[in-house]
Amino acid sequence: MKIVKYKKCKNKYNVYFDGGNYVSLYEDIILKYSLLLKKEITDKELESIKIDNTKEEIYDVALKYISIKMRSRKEIETYLKKKEYSYSDISNTIERLEKNGFINDEMYAKAYINDKFNLSNSGPNKIKKELLKQGIKEEIIDNYISSINEEEMIDKLDRLVNKKIKTTKGCSGNVLKQKLINYFINEGYYLKDIERILENKDFNTGNVKKEYDKLYNRYFKKYSGYELDMIIKQKLYQKGYNYDTMK
């Protein structure tokens, strides 16, 4: 069959043959096989061209995925598997991307940790779990997390704790302290750092009189006297308030 015409179509070319058939090819494939106008190619050659063109297509799909934001090796593998490409084609594409510097899990981990530390509330343990899910090796993660300045981490945690104390309503004292510990452990911070920050905080920030009045209005129709007093006292203690400060 003979090539009789080319037509540009986005990032590919439609290559037309005599007889009316055509194939959509990437420019690199056209150059690789020197597919010049009027060139004759066999059916066997066309099959080889299509195989290489599919490889180029997968590479192009991966590049577009990476162009949105930096990706880990595992993220790209998972993405390409969902496209139902063959294992060998995915493996070859990953190898080519790594060779050309488009995949680098060390650089990915470094950038990810830097962004999470500066742009989110996440602590080191949470960041590590997220990176492990994305297929980053533990030794790479630990290497870059250990490079975070400890005092900067403490300063960040201190700011977050102050903000959380102000926004946590309806509890005080040890109840508030335990809530803060649980919250920041879930956010990925080390217990020793959380306790270090909380040592110098005042947890009696709630308005015990206001809480007392709310509970009184809720229970005075159902209870009275000593029983009402004990109910209110119990509820206040559950919220971490010191009822005795009202006496």
Image: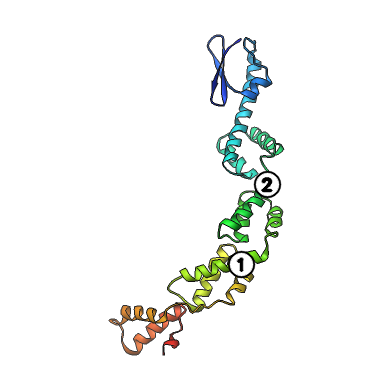
Residue 59 pos. (x, y %): 62, 33
Instruction: Determine whether the residue tagged by mark 1 lies in a helix, strand or loop.
Output: helix
Q: Is the residue 46 above or below the residue 182 in the image?
A: above
Residue at image x 68%, y 44%?
104
Q: Is the residue 86 above or below the residue 74 in the image?
A: above
Q: Amino acid at mark 2?
A: Asp
User: Is 118 in front, or is 129?
Assistant: 118
Q: Which mark is residue 35?
A: none
Report the mark closest to the observer, 1 or 2.
Answer: 1
Residue 229 pos. (x, y %): 37, 87
Q: Quadrant of residue 212?
A: bottom left
Residue at image x 61%, y 58%?
117
Specify few, some or many for label 2: CA neighbours under 10 Å numbering under 14, 14-19, or 20 or more. many
Residue at image x 64%, y 35%?
90
Q: Which mark is residue 105?
A: 2
Q: Amino acid at mark 1?
A: Asp
Q: Which residue lies under the disc numbered 1?
A: 155
Q: Is the residue 200 above or below the residue 99 in the image?
A: below
User: Is 165 in front, or is 93?
Assistant: 165
State whether residue 1 appears in this view: no
Q: Left of 209 or right of it: where is 240?
A: right
Q: Left of 185 or right of it: where is 91?
A: right
